[in-house]
Image: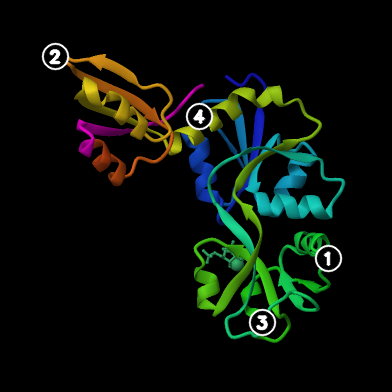
Amino acid sequence: MFNKKITIAIQSKGRLYEESKKLLSNSGISFRIIENRLLTRASNVNVDILQVRDDDIPSLVSNKVADLGIVGKNLLDEQLAGDKSLSVKETISLGFSKCKLCFAKPKDSTTDSLNNKVIASSYPNLVNQYLKQNKIKADVIKINGSVELTPYIGIADYICDLVSSGATLEANNLEATETLMESEAVLISSNDVDDTNFFDLVNRFKGVINAKDSKYVMLNCDESNIKKICALLPGSESPTIIPLEQKRKFAVHALCKEPVFWETMEELKENGASSVLVLPVEKILN
Ligand code: PRP
Ligand code: ZN
């Protein structure tokens, strides 16, 4: 597997770290990360893992030090907006670390527009791009950390920062006004490299991502209820219908690509399903 060595850069700590490692190990890559070590070699496949600061990942991939990288879309777009020489592209969305980049202001502030205001952000390029697109005149100051404090020390009217649970805004008495972008972790590769080199690995990533929300559902029902029940199975394509020993009784097996909630199971039961089993799906290879 993976004849040519693949080097993949991930964040060494922070919001993407744990999920990035989980994606790699669920994709069949065995490794043991030693703290503070830059490079980890997988023990079973031809893969090297680089643990670096997330700001460095796009340029490491652009310069082909790493073949692939896992970064937040927010960081990627900010760097692409600011550095035209960066030659990387988003390969696939990875479905974790979902958050939004939002404008926010103090709850007690009486201003109602960004016009002529001062905005503090770690994403000045994206903010300036947004202002330009929306024909708004405002000053942007770049702050690297603790952006949420800037309205209180009197240096900004608004902030533009990542919001995930909303706890940071709440704790700082701020409220979100508008969303600049939705973000999540993405896989990036260089624009000038043939992606077929990573085809198998990227397919494994896709298999793990697809499986995450998927469940395998098995249930029994009368012949007369099959149609109704199949229509209730969330995100399933073509369920398998198997006759049971008992006359006019059938088993329905389906891969559901959307979450199966208790409410759905209860509805299935109300429509004549019995012995409803919901099983986890580990991997999918299409
Ligand atoms: C981000 C962002 C907020 C917080 C939002 O910071 O800057 O502070 O997360 O998340 P919440 O809505 O769940 O509270 P991060 O933790 O990435 O660290 P940083 O600010 O040091 O980069
Ligand atoms: Zn923060």
Q: Position of residue 157 (x, y in %)?
A: 71, 80
Give the secondary structure at mark 3: loop
Could one spot residue 32 in this view of the protein?
no
Depth check: give the residue in front, 145 or 138: 138
List the residue tagged with mark 3. 151
- Foreground mark, 2 or 1? 2
Crowding at dot 2, Cα within 10 Å, few <14 / some 14-19 / many 20+, comes out as few
Per the image, the residue denoted by label 2 is 247
Query: Bounds of the magenta span?
Result: 269-286
- Ligand 1 closer than 8 Å to the CB at disc 4? no
- Dots 4 and 2: beta carbons under 8 Å? no
Q: Nearer the viewer, residue 207 or 111?
A: 111
**In the displayed structure image, the side of residue 226 where residue 71 appears, left or right:** right
Question: On residue 207, which mark appears?
Answer: 4
Q: Amino acid at mark 1?
A: Lys
Residue at disc 1, secondary structure: loop
